[in-house]
Image: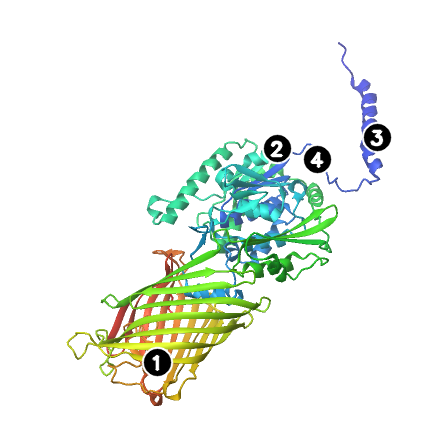
């Protein structure tokens, strides 16, 4: 075999170089480009396709944003995204065209904790719902239908989260193939009926992200294409295989799953349940990790101090994600593109959107699944056919619909078919019943045998008729009181909020009477007691005051009675006296203003309740009452101040009589009471009674910034200073010395309602240790 010499090679090399030069020019000539043009938007065919896998983990998902920020800085291209739960939310938004910095900025501008957990701005709720959460602070509602009781499928319906995701993805129609997004995207969910994994790859992007994040028991399941779906973390919390199925060569997997807790940290059923879910999710994560190749990259941000619900610590999660990328920077650098190539990649994946800014709504379809008529839903919509589609404006309408309390969820989809844009509104009524029961507990004790206990039960039956008639019932059963209130509320003009309410009520109360000529001390014992009964029937007209409250004006007929048992002068043997009775027709005005941000531990807002009732019977039997109480709250950081004021008086033809064993009522009227926690805390419950009352309290609350303290959620330390008194005669009203009291306490929300434990003291050596369950104002 002869060897080629250098001289013989030169002509060959020259000819080869010439041919290569010609071939290299052909594409540029064909496209009319100059030699100085940037690289083609098409990636180099030799570059591996890179898939990003984002796991679920609630608030820990902020780490995904940190990972995305660093991948952008390293110029690592992403060709496909697969996500589960919070990973699907972050991944879906990024795939739709929101870059990491923009995504971080948007999330920093919203309170994601309030949004994720459907916490509505209380001041914007209808007054009827504010009434309920004031009276039933447990917040537990059971439904009743078809002869059985049911509970909601989730503590949170997720309506606010879905609305936010819809606004942020409004440029995409709700029947899109997710492969046509700037970055192809898939979300993982679980079919609640079969337990199978469900890949969401088309339809509404917002709905897919919300379905993937439907944590069982916490977020309500959501229906997509006829299937009831929950969180995809149950089957694949780290969907590596899903990314492989999208045709990627290299996977960057980000696992933000929670670590298992120590056995000594599992101090509650909720903690044990969370540990069980973590174990189950961990098993499928390990299976998915086993699918990773040597060329793949696994990132596991250090999120020790960040829990599933710590949305307020989002910046901490972002930083942890950034650090995880820095730790793996050497491996990720091999996937980095040159500045020119990455610029071309970004240009090719620039979001275009499918809906033009001026897209008009050609048709509106409204569906409901229960008693609420379609006409009622349309009445609350401000959008009409022919209007320009505005997701944010439409979501404000849907928010107003969801805050009525009639619906479990209200969703919107804008579907494009053959150039026709149809807006579909789906208002789904509560799936757990058409009647609802509310519950509350109250208890007060000072550990010396004196105290009280009561159970509150509410019943609501909305939409008895197509006109919106609602039946409302409230029952209180307790150790010293019982009451029943029933009323029908018939809307007069739905759009204006006016209603007429015929009602009937009965109340029975046993009250201890203390002889107030004796110095009041902790050991003061009741001298007598009185049992009062009040029955009233009437009809009111209710008028809303915007979203601030309402006024009720009406007429009624009332009957009252009082029966006394004297103990002080009979050696402790009860001696009943003749029952005092009174009755009259009356007119009533009731004003309610409620703008508190929270009915139990308010940090801002105000509350005012004023009630005036005047009889118009015969002059010698007429009796009138007036009562008002208010609360104002303001806060700065962890510090909150509450100011409470109360005043009351009753005026009648008969003068109050000290002969009634110290009873301060007016004839058959029971009068007004002071004493008990946050109502002169150092004294016994209802220790002071009179026909006139003045009371004031200043309370300071300090947020302990502890998630859980002995079962109390968001506990506070409180200090209060109180002053007030009661008077029997109108001429003495406001005169003389005021009783004073101060207290120190710890309080917070418990599973059975607000709970307080503390110590109170007053002059003359009066003191009290108390435990209080239930609302105190």
Asked if the residues shown at circle 2 and circle 3 are in contact, with their CB atoms under 8 angstroms apart, the answer is no
Rendering coords of residue 260 (x, y %) = 40, 43
Q: Earlier in the sequence, mark 3 or mark 4?
A: 3
Which residue was labeled with disc 1? Answer: 582
Number of residues whose C-alpha sits closer than 10 Å to that of mark 3, classed few (under 14), some (14–19) or many (20 or more): few
The residues tagged by marks 1 and 3 sit, at their Cα atoms, a distance apart of: 113 Å
Which residue was labeled with disc 3? Answer: 22
Q: Determine if residue 68 is in view.
A: no
Q: Earlier in the sequence, mark 2 or mark 4?
A: 4
Residue closer to the observer: 772 or 468: 468
The residues tagged by marks 2 and 4 sit, at their Cα atoms, a distance apart of: 14 Å
* Label 3: element kind: helix
Figure quadrant of the C terminus: bottom left
Rendering coords of residue 349 (x, y %) = 69, 44
Rendering coords of residue 21 (x, y %) = 82, 30
Q: Earlier in the sequence, mark 2 or mark 3?
A: 3
Number of residues whose C-alpha sits closer than 10 Å to that of mark 1, classed few (under 14), some (14–19) or many (20 or more): some
Q: Determine if residue 775 is in view.
A: yes
* Label 2: element kind: loop
Name the front one of labels 4 and 1: 1
> Taking 202 as reference, is 134 above or below it?
below
Which residue was labeled with disc 2? Answer: 249
Give the residue displayed 59% in from the left and 43% down from the top. Answer: 225
Give the residue displayed 27% in from the left and 67% down from the top. Answer: 451
The residues tagged by marks 3 and 4 sit, at their Cα atoms, a distance apart of: 21 Å
Q: Which mark is residue 686?
A: none
Number of residues whose C-alpha sits closer than 10 Å to that of mark 4, classed few (under 14), some (14–19) or many (20 or more): few
The residues tagged by marks 2 and 1 sit, at their Cα atoms, a distance apart of: 88 Å
Asked if the residues shown at circle 1 and circle 3 are in contact, with their CB atoms under 8 angstroms apart, the answer is no
The residues tagged by marks 2 and 3 sit, at their Cα atoms, a distance apart of: 33 Å
């Amino acid at each position: 075999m002869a060897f080629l010499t250098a001289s013989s090679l030169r002509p060959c090399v020259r000819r080869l170089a010439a041919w290569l030069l010609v071939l290299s020019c052909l594409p540029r000539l064909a496209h009319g480009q100059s030699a100085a043009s940037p690289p083609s938007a098409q990636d180099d065919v030799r570059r591996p396709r890179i898939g990003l896998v984002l796991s679920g983990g609630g608030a820990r998902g902020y780490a995904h944003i940190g990972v995305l920020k660093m991948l952008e800085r390293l110029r690592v291209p992403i060709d496909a995204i697969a996500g589960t739960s919070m990973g699907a939310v972050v991944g879906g938004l990024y795939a739709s065209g929101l870059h990491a910095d923009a995504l971080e900025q948007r999330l920093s501008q919203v309170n994601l904790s309030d949004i994720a957990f459907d916490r509505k701005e209380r001041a914007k709720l209808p007054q009827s719902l504010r009434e309920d959460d004031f009276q039933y602070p447990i917040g537990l509602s059971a439904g009743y239908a078809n002869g059985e009781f049911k509970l909601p499928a989730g503590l949170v319906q997720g309506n606010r989260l879905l609305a936010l995701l819809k606004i942020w993805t409004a440029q995409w129609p709700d029947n899109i193939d997710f492969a046509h997004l700037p970055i192809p995207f898939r979300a993982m969910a679980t079919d609640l009926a079969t337990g199978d994994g469900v890949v969401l790859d088309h339809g509404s992007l917002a709905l897919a992200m919300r379905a993937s994040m439907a944590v069982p028991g916490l977020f309500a399941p959501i229906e997509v294409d006829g299937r009831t779906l929950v969180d995809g973390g149950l089957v694949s919390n780290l969907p590596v295989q899903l990314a492989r199925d999208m045709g990627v060569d290299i996977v960057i997997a980000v696992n933000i799953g929670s670590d298992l807790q120590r056995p000594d940290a599992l101090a509650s059923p909720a903690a044990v349940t969370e540990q069980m879910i973590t174990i189950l999710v961990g098993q499928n994560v390990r299976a998915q990790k086993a699918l990773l190749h040597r060329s793949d990259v696994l990132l596991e941000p250090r999120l020790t101090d960040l829990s599933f619900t710590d949305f307020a610590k989002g910046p901490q999660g972002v930083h942890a994600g950034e650090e995880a990328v820095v730790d793996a920077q050497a491996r990720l650098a091999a996937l980095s593109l040159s500045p020119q190539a990455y610029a071309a990649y970004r240009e090719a994946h620039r979001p275009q959107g499918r809906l033009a800014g001026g897209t008009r709504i050609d048709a509106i379809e409204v569906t409901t699944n229960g008693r609420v008529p379609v006409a009622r839903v349309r009445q609350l919509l401000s959008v009409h056919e022919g209007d320009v589609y505005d997701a944010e404006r439409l979501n404000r309408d849907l928010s107003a619909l969801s805050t009525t309390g009639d619906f479990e969820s209200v969703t919107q989809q804008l579907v494009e078919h053959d150039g026709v844009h149809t807006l579909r509104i789906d208002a789904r009524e509560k799936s757990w019943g058409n009647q609802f029961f509310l519950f509350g507990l109250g208890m007060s004790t000072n550990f010396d045998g004196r105290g009280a206990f009561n159970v509150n039960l509410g019943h609501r039956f909305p939409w008895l008729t197509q006109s919106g008639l609602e039946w409302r019932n409230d029952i209180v059963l307790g150790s010293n009181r019982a009451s029943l209130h029933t009323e029908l509320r018939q809307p007069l003009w739905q759009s204006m909020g006016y209603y007429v309410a015929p009602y009937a009520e009965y109340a029975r109360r046993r009250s201890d009477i203390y002889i107030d000529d004796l110095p009041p001390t902790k050991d003061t014992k009741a001298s007598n007691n009185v049992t009062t009964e009040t029955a009233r029937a009437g009809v009111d007209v209710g008028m809303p005051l915007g979203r601030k409250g309402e006024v009720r004006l009406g007429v009624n007929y009332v009957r009252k009675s009082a029966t006394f048992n004297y103990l002080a002068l009979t050696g402790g043997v009860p001696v009943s006296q003749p029952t005092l009775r009174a009755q009259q027709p009356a007119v009533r005005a009731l004003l309610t203003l409620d703008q508190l941000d929270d009915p139990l531990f308010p940090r801002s807002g105000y509350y005012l309740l004023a009630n005036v009732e005047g009889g118009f019977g015969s002059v010698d039997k007429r009796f009138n009452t007036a009562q008002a109480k208010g609360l104002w709250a303001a806060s700065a950081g962890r510090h909150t101040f509450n100011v409470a004021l109360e005043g009351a008086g009753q005026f009648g033809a008969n003068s109050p009589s000290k002969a009634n064993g110290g009873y301060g009522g007016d004839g058959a009227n029971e009068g007004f009471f002071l004493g008990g926690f946050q109502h002169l805390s150092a004294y016994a419950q209802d220790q002071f009674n009179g026909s006139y009352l003045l009371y004031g309290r200043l309370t300071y609350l300090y947020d302990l910034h502890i998630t859980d303290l002995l079962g109390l959620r968001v506990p506070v330390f409180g200090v209060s200073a109180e002053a007030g008194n009661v008077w029997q005669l109108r001429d003495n009203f406001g005169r003389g010395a005021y009783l004073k009291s101060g207290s120190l306490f710890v309080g917070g929300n418990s599973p059975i309602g607000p709970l307080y434990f503390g110590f109170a003291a007053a002059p003359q050596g009066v003191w009290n240790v108390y435990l209080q369950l239930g609302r105190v104002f």
